[in-house]
Amino acid sequence: MRLRINWSYILALTVSIAAALVIGAAILLISGYDPLKAYAAMLSGAFSNARHIGDVLEYAMVLCLCGVACDIGSRVGIFNVGGEGQLLLGAIVAAQIGVALNGLSAWIVIPVAGLGAALVGGLYALLPGWLKVKHRVNEVITTIMLNNIAEFVCEYLAKGPWKNPDNNIVAGTGNLPQTYWFTRLATGSNLTTVFFVATGMTILTWYVMQKTATGYEMRLTGDNPRFARFAGLKTDRIVLIAMLVSGMMCGLVGMFRVYGAEHIYKASISNDYYFEGLMVAMIAKYQVLPTAVISVLFAILKIGAQGMETAAGVPNQIYLIIQTVVIFSMAAESGIVSDIKRRMADKSARLAARQRAKEGAANE
Amino acid sequence: MQETVIRLEHITREFPGVLANDDVSLEVRRGEVFALVGENGAGKSTLMNIIYGIYPPTDGSVYIRGKKVETFSPRNAIELGIGMVHQHFMLVPSFTVAQNIVMSREPRRAKVFFDNRRAEEITRQLVKEYGLSVDPSARVQDISVGVQQRVEILKALYRGADILILDEPTAVLTPQETAELFRVIRHIIREKNMTVILITHKLGEVMAISDRVGIMRQGRLVGLSDTRDITEREIASMMVGRPVLFDKLERSGEPGETMISVEGLSVRDNRGLVAVDGVSLEARAGEVLGIAAIEGNGQSELLEAITGMRPAISGRVRIRGRDSTGLEPGQIRALGLAHVPEDRLATGVDPLADVSDNLLAGRQRDREFNAAGGLRLRRSSIERYASEVYRKFDIRGAGLHGAVGSMSGGNMQKVVVAREFSHETPVLVISNPSRGIDIGAIEFIHTAIIEKRNEGCAVLLSSADLDEIFRLSDRIVTMYEGRITGEFKPDEITKEEIGYYMTGSRRKEELAPNETAD
């Protein structure tokens, strides 16, 4: 509850990232690229101008909200792997609302679209939550399956009833009227004013989880549901609400993508963004603030890698290599750290015992 | 004097942050019962685990029959003739007695096929040799705990053990089964000249069966004596490190109105079998009603059904006159009930949260702890409340912000009791309050329970420890296979006699559920 800085965690994360960069460099070297040049291109790809910085922040926002959605589930002991489906459904519903309500004021359409996206995402998450609570159905399996279903439903809608009549190349909804677009913060980038809303959502989630009785109850439920119920909490309801909110957040990410970046629903509205967010959440050990920080780090790597591809001709898959090495190292971290600690403790104990024995002998 | 079979020299074992054994030197001789006593966490089990080879000592040496042990592994210990019966039995429930006994050294036909007939023959032979009676072809899941223990002992004997380590062997036994176990121990020592090391914290048993006793406290061996030269009281003071006075608990007040009333309650256990079968009972304000039963006779399910942790199949529960059947635990708590659960780690705490957050559980919505109309937890008030409770209940160890999961059993139990006893609740349901905790903490918790009783609370107490039941209860009911078999005042029956009611071999007919229904 209190803000504590976990230095060993920060150290482990730094070492992981450094190791990942070294391994990435080795691969670059073997493939015949100059790693220093490639990394320099990566940095300039992420920071060289306002457009790049904007893209980094936009991508960080998407990762962060997805990660936070995952954090909310994890806090009550449920692993929402279905965010991708919730996101897609939110995106398509929000896009279609914009198309269908064309002509009405943005002050009406945007809130309605946000509400619609949140509702459909939330309800889509509520289903596996309900199955888990009432029938003990494993949520990991149901949410993964529901991802596929959502994908197919969206494909059907985008090719069928909600198809864009003016576009026969890409399957998607109609174009979003320009009056509803979020205002760009940097020319040419996808960063829009919704960034502030996302920041607010992240801070609000952090506040609720850390500072309120609700967050406390969520934590008890996640740590030991039997104890939570024993202490008088309505654990089923807490899990359902957390799942609803997690899904709502994913639905809103879909809406943000449509109204901020793409201005149309198409299948590429999310390129497994939720799964990347989930990775971030895992690395952040499901804590909100670290999720936000690591989102920014990963966004720098990802957007930078795209710049590196254009500037230095290095395939941006190098980003995936770095990302997976970081995840791998962090997953191994807790085990390795405790192992090292145990060995050090054993050794010092042996020394202390010898010392005591020596002193004992000297005294006699 | 007989030869020394085990010699420990300066054994030290350290775990991260804990000195479990600190320079322990000790000898055990052939043909004796050596009792090792101490509070929980005193290092008895660590010491035995070193002898049994589960882990090596950090420093010091172990000699078995004069030979220094170089490799520490259970396999090696078994070869050296050491057998250990753990507190939790290591048996395969779906196998027969004979199959369990010969496991790891099974007789075979043509070197491949398991020879069941031969296994049963071996078992019968062991039974004859050592005087422990078991049915070789019975399945372990169908036999009682006492018999399972005999199977464990036979298993060790079959593997050639002549040094037997018994870890808290009587914790799960009835008085009759305990007497039988002691008969067996005396038999194998007299007839086979074996050695038995008995880990226990029941001092009565130490006096009854052991030849010598070693007393451990905080990892050290603080006393070593021939049993006949020492008194129970002396042993207890050495264990705790100060004189312990099991004083009579001061009782005051008269029983008042009925606070808990249970009528014809039936409940299923986790396997779906009927564990509580039409139980009726009442507990009144200002009295402790004790439930005496051997583990697994429905008392756990009964208490869980009363507190809402488990649904009932039929019957009614009333708490302070209000029908509470089928309510959630939170709703039942709101009627004025507090609950100290049987399994503190699984049910009683959030092991990952700190002490302060564990003490808060259930009161997180109280006005006292919330600011801004419930929008913010008031950390300073929580801190103040928690540190007050922490002091009052004499919790030690991790401090207010240490994780509860890393505390010792006794302190963890104090956290549970501190939380449950700090609510304003006239009804207390308590299950095994002193299981696995040390004498000092037991004394504290017993006093707290009687204080609550004297204040006018109704206390429903279930315990596997008969001494505890007799010490605390104003009335005792016995339970066997899900039914009430008798009701007594503690002064009108002995512990031996009540054992017959706990095993169903006697019952008070007038109390059978069918007759009491109307």
Image (cartoon, grey):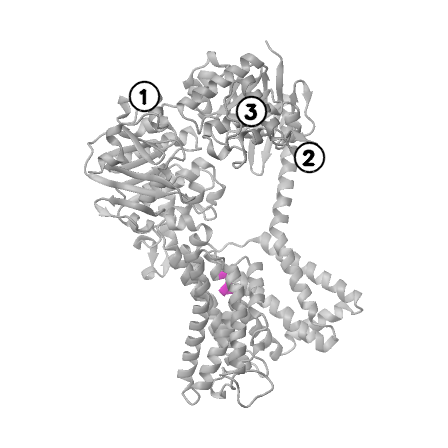
Task: List x then y, in percent, for residue A194.
Answer: 49, 76
Residue tagged by mark 2? B112
> Is residue B222 placed above or below B438 in the rendered structure?
above
Q: Position of residue A327 (x, y in %)?
A: 63, 59
Q: Badge 1 sits on which subunit?
A: B
> Which of B328 and A357 lies nearest the eye of the viewer?
B328
Could you tell me the amino acid type at mark 2? Val
Identify the mark at residue B494; answer none if there is no mark.
1
First of labels 3, 2 by sequence position:
2
What residue did someone put label 3 on? B154
Q: Rounded to the nearest whole Å, what is the CA distance between mark 3 and mark 2?
A: 24 Å
Q: Quadrant of residue A326?
A: bottom right
Point out the tag, 1 or 2, that comes first from the N-terminus. Answer: 2
Q: Quadrant of residue B306?
A: top left
| Front residue (pair B338, A24) | B338
Give the amino acid at mark 1: Thr
Closest to the observer: B133 or A178? B133
Q: Which residues are magenta?
A: A67-71
Please identify, in this view, whether the residue under mark 3 or under mark 2 is nearer the observer. 2
In the picture, which quadrant includes the C terminus of chain B? top left
